[in-house]
Amino acid sequence: MNKIVIAFISVLFMTSTSFSQNNWREELKEQLPLLGHRNWILVVDAAYPLQSKPAIKTLVTGEDQLEVVKEVLDAVEKASHVYPEIYLDKELDYVPEEEAVGIEAYRNNLYKLIKGKNTTKVLHEELIADIDEAAKLFNVLILKTNLTIPYTSVFIRLDCGYWGAEQEEKLRERMKEE
């Protein structure tokens, strides 16, 4: 009986998680054309939890977080069908350097990288709950990095790249007029 349970658990984890550090770029390249508005791509630190919903796929990159964030944002921005909305942990601005060595340099480099992009700060637990809720209907790709500084996860919610909120609002108003 124990062997059956272990085999089942192994299959369960294999369907939603990959521990290969070499295939995340290929996976992103394959998945991005399939992803659309309401899907998420997360670039997270080493302690980010493995979430259990089948629609959440976690890949361990073994790489520098800011490099992964840059590559993901570059890929998303080159894709004409989606637009990145960035969410950061609200706690990020309150973590002191003396308790998390390297946080100041990380924050400075991250803020340079995302300057001018649509960015919102939300409490970490709320973001995790949002991901859990989104995974009921939509896929989530998590790229886990080797960063060991707290509250540094970058949550990227994809929106439609060719139809914006303003256009949607105007469409809904026109529909009310009939």
Image (tube, helix red, strand yellow):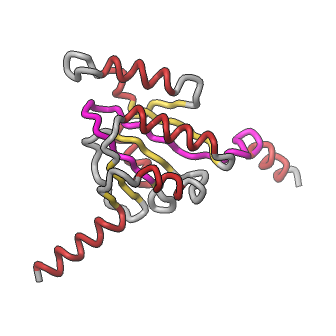
Which corner quadrant of the image does residue 76 belong to? top right
The magenta span reads 141-167
Look at the picture and state if 87 lies above or below 171: above
Q: Is residue 51 above or below residue 77?
A: below
Q: Nearer the viewer, residue 60 or 137?
A: 60
Q: Is residue 111 left or right of residue 123?
A: right
Left-right relation of 118 to 57: right
Queried whether the magenta region covers residue 175, the answer comes back as no
Q: Is residue 111 above or below residue 139?
A: above
At 42% from the left edge and 21% from the top edge, which residue is drawn?
A: 109
Residue drawn at x 80%, y 48% is: 171
Q: Quadrant of the C terminus?
A: bottom right
**Residue 123 location (% of width, % of height):** 38, 34
**Residue at left offset 11%, top offset 83%:** 1
Farthest residue to the bottom: give it: 1
Q: Which residue is located at x 70 percent, y 41 percent?
A: 165
